[in-house]
Image (spheres, rainbow, N blue to C red):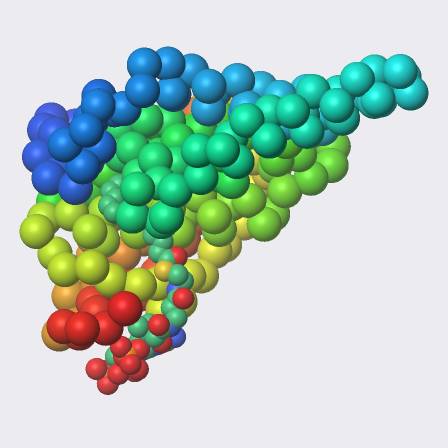
Amino acid sequence: MDDEAIVLAAPLVRTDPHRPDTETWLGRPVPEGYTDMIDQVRELLDRLAGAAPSAEVVRSTTKTVAELSAALAAYEVDEPDQLSGRLGSAAGRAQVAGPALHVDEVDDERMTGRVRFGRHFLGSNGVVHGGAIPYLFDDLLGRLALGGGRPRSRTAYLHVDYRSVAPIDTELRVAAFFDREEGRKHFLRGTLHDGDRLCAEATALFVALNPGQT
Ligand SMILES: CCCCCCCCCCCCCCCC(=O)SCCNC(=O)CCNC(=O)[C@H](O)C(C)(C)COP(=O)(O)OP(=O)(O)OC[C@H]1O[C@@H](n2cnc3c(N)ncnc32)[C@H](O)[C@@H]1OP(=O)(O)O
């Protein structure tokens, strides 16, 4: 039985203690509608990538975006208080640098989910940019590396094999596997599928940080 079949056959449970819900962060409530705002920004990036607007629309969009930036600048916080990228149960951790990854099932050794790359991540000919796929795997495997009560770790290497093209605007399946541990070294791998077709697979080494290592 291959890895995919094992994942589909085995019932997984949500046990990852590193997944704060979207309602609170650091014990404080996440502002209502925060993840909707992030979704709208994703939509904006997709529209921007796909649009060839008139000069008038360029002018008005530039003005509106500048106003939005100014409004958010008034609420700038230091890194520990940042929400984007910290909401483990939000799509793509509410971080628009990467695609909207939804984690469906996770245990200490495995994680499965779905991802959709919008037009923002287009390379050419309707397929995902090759640089966006390592981002996905780093995030996916990095999250599993943190699971099971394991210490904080950092990507030492990430190797991606592109097996077939990954289409944009399509729900793709992801899976991650914790392979083995050798001292501080944690070896993981992941897969990206379009239906039954393997699009890409990755192997990675995460090295657990020593006490005091930042
Ligand atoms: C706040 C809460 C939020 C919650 C909500 C959601 C959760 C949030 C999820 C986040 C998910 C995103 C996850 C992204 C994760 C990154 O992307 S991290 C950023 C990218 N990575 C980096 O910047 C790493 C840069 N490199 C380094 O910092 C250091 O080289 C490392 C990796 C820490 C290792 O350095 P070191 O600690 O000095 O260890 P070192 O002694 O050199 O090596 C230890 C062992 O590893 C081996 N090794 C090290 N590097 C390599 C290599 N490249 N190849 C092969 N072997 C290697 C060594 O040979 C050695 O092996 P042994 O001799 O023990 O057998």
Q: Quadrant of ligand 1?
A: bottom left
Give the residue drawn at x 73%, y 36%: 124
Number of numbered callouts drawn: 0
Left or right? Give the position of 87 relative to 158: left
- Is residue 101 visible from the viewing direction of this image? no
Furthest toward the front, the residue is 74
Q: Horizontal placement of 81 versus 101: left or right? A: left
Q: Is residue 58 above or below residue 193?
A: above
Quadrant holding the C terminus: bottom left
Q: Specify whether 193 is left or right of 20.
A: right
Question: Considering only vertical position in the picture, is 163 above or below 38?
Answer: below
Q: Is residue 68 visible?
A: yes
The residue that appears at 10% across and 39% down in the rendered structure is 17
Residue 86: percent from left, percent from top: 31, 39
* In this rendering, position of residue 122 left or right of residue 137: right
Residue at x 34% of width, y 35% of height: 83
Q: Residue furthest right?
A: 55
x, y percent for residue 161: 50, 54
Q: Nearer the viewer, residue 89 or 214?
A: 214
Residue that appears at 44% across and 33% down: 75
Rendered-image quadrant of the N terminus: top left
Quarter of the image for residue 2 reads top left
Q: Nearer the viewer, residue 123 or 64?
A: 64
Image quadrant where residue 136 sits: top left
